[in-house]
Image: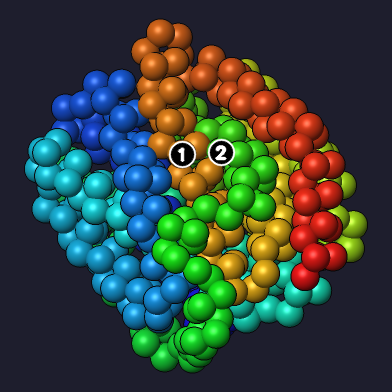
Amino acid sequence: MYTCAFIANFMLCVSQFIVNPLVATYAGVLGADSVMIGVISGLYFGVAFAVRPFSGPAITKLNKKYIMLAAYALGCVVNVIYALSNGIPLFVTARILHGVQFAFIGSLNMTLASDSLPPEKLGSGLGLFGVGGAVATAIAPSLGISLRAWGETLFASTTAGYTIVFSVAAACMLISIIPCLIMPYKPLTGAELQSLGKWYKNIIATEAILPAVVVTFYSIAGIMYTIFMEPFAREQGIGNIGLFFTVYAIAILAARPLCGRLVDKYGTAKIFFPSSVLFAASFLITGTSRMLGQVLVGAALAAIGYGSAQPALQTMCMRSVAAPRRGVASNTNYFGMDFGYFIGPTIGGFVIARTSHASLFTLTIIPVFIAVAIFAIGLKPFNERVMKKRLGD
């Protein structure tokens, strides 16, 4: 099950990272201003956030394999709609449907991976699971930019380049259905379903609220790189910005498996605090960059910081609950991620409209500091609650 979930998640990430870095520029091509670009970019995550009260209980209580097949099929349809978009209304429609898909697929992948791992290997297993996303991050953004340029040249049309990108993303989602079909899956027993209670008790795991809130502020910061890096490079006159994503991915590829093992050995806190320092430093370096070399240093620091802290927080979420409720914990984690990814681009759009892309990256150190403060204040009560629950069980 772990292998099939890994492959499907890898193809999902390729599809997403081909598309996401180009959403802002394509919205501009279709006529959106800077504020509207931020709103459209974040809409995907806002919709996912709104749908999670329904997707969380469904993922926890229903057949996960069937939900997975439906969600990946929807992803294929969404990218076809992107490809057909010739104006803001249809593009926004695709963005909304994409958000619905993400509400199910993100937490579902993490839940399936967690369910196939022994408790003592949860951190290292989730860290390794993130390697697929890291590899996708390495190849997909540059691939997307190259496909767009090839399509523009071949058809002598700006929109044709984006159509090619969205078509390839749709093909990736179609391929991802194959591992979903062959994945072995054992549904929950009647007793396990009974223990989960009514549907509304499976929307949010209160035990996992602390890491989910921290993830919110981390996501506000992290999404700035995905959405605004290409416009920042154009503003500063920095070429070959696709290398940012390549360096980011190589660094995160190295950091994630190691981080998972360190979390299993030393605990979340000893990984989270130094990782946050590196993540914050990346924004200061990037915001003051005027050359590609400086940006790439920022990319490496961002990847090591974010790539180490994120699996640590995910492991913290999943360990806070009993195994049958991991779907609820995963959904809680994605509540935080979705909300951060939703409001991040909107905040970024307003900041850019009043300052610049460079100032945006420099100011993004603020949500990282807020995340660290919340984690530091809440860690002791969190550990006490988890320990009390384990003793009670």
In the rendered image, the residue lying farthest to the right is 266
Where is residue 205? Give x, y as percent.
58, 55
Determine if residue 315 is in view.
no
- Residue 250: name its quadrant: bottom right
Q: What residue sits 60% from the left and 19% below the top?
A: 362
The quadrant of the picture occupied by the N terminus is: bottom right
Task: Between residue 337 and residue 29, name the one nearer to us.
Answer: 337
Q: Are marks 1 and 2 in contact (CB under 8 Å)?
A: yes
Determine if residue 79 is in view.
yes
Where is residue 240? Give x, y as percent.
48, 39
Q: Is residue 216 left or right of residue 49?
A: right
Q: What residue sits 77% from the left and 70% below the top?
A: 393
Where is residue 344? Give x, y as percent.
46, 31
Crowd rating for badge 2 (residues with CA inside 10 Å; few <14, some 14–19, many 20+): many
Amino acid on which disc 2 is placed: Thr
Amino acid on which disc 1 is placed: Phe
Task: Check disc 1 and report its element: helix, strand or loop.
Answer: helix
Q: Is residue 297 left or right of residue 382?
A: left
Residue picked out by circle 2:
216
Mark number for residue 120? Answer: none
Where is residue 100? Give x, y as percent.
30, 55
Q: What residue sits 38% from the left and 60% below the top?
A: 55
Q: Is residue 391 above or below residue 66?
A: above
Please, which colouring scheme is shown? rainbow
Task: Between residue 78 and residue 145, name the one nearer to us.
Answer: 78
- Residue 389: name its quadrant: bottom right
Q: What residue sits 41% from the left and 91% below the top?
A: 182
Q: Is residue 378 above or below residue 198?
A: above
Residue picked out by circle 1:
339
Q: Is residue 274 above or below residue 178?
A: above
Q: Disc 1 versus disc 2: distance between alpha carbons?
A: 6 Å
Crowd rating for badge 1 (residues with CA inside 10 Å; few <14, some 14–19, many 20+): many
